[in-house]
Amino acid sequence: MKKQKGMILFFSLIFLMIMTVIGVALAVNSSQSMKMAGAGSDRIAAMTSAQGAQERAIFQSQGVSLDHLKQTLVVENNSLGVTSVFTPQASSSKKCQRSNKPNPKIGCTKLEVSSTAVFGRKGLGLLTVVTGIEQEFIDL
């Protein structure tokens, strides 16, 4: 009978150690999942910021400021932490791509707008949204 009591204590300690190892493994796995979920939400927030800043920069720069743009234009959005860069595209033709009946007096300026947002811990994440624009103008 005394030998059996010792065996119960031994198996109880083994069972307790196994449960402790399982608990620690689950805690580490949960911590990793939380970090991955946080990184995903940071990326989604950066994507939303970059798209919003890009739309705002395009809206504020429409019209005369984009007409016949010859050099790169940089627009900073400090509230969202996004930098938008307007780059004119060199093309041999000023014709509009989507015009089914081209008019020789109407041309298009082609631009590429890239908005870059930095996100994540220590700013290690970098997300860039790129959009192409064709703006019509009258060539006199």
Image: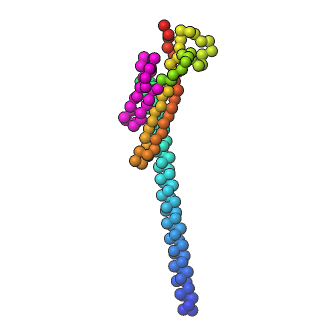
Residue range highlighted in magenta: 61-87
**What is the residue that sits farthest to the bottom in this orientation?**
1
Q: What is the x, y in percent for residue 121? A: 42, 48
The answer to whether residue 45 of the structure is visible from this angle is no
Q: Which of 116 and 1 lies nearest the eye of the viewer?
A: 116
- Where residue 39 appears, as percent x and y from the top left, is 48, 48
Q: Which of 13 and 101 is in front in this view?
A: 101
| Left or right, residue 26 beside residue 76 | right
Tell me which residue sits at (43%, 41%) in the image.
118
Residue projecting furthest to the left:
78
Residue at the front extreme?
92
- Residue found farthest to the top: 140
Q: Does the magenta stretch include residue 78?
A: yes
- Picture residue at 50% right of the left edge, 58% below the top: 30
* Residue 94 part of the magenta-drawn span: no
Nearest the viewer among 55 and 96 is 96
Q: Report whether residue 122 is seen.
A: yes
Figure check: 13 above or below 53: below
For the point 50% across and 51% down, which residue is it?
36
Q: Residue at x 55, y 80 (%)?
A: 11
The image position of residue 38, as x and y in percent, is 47, 49
**Numbered-mark total:** 0
Which scheme is used to colour this image of the protein?
A: rainbow
Relative to 75, 17 lies left or right? right
Image quarter (top left, top right, bottom left or bottom right) of the N terminus: bottom right
Q: In x, y percent, where is residue 94?
A: 54, 16
**Vertical relation: 75 (above or below) 104:** below
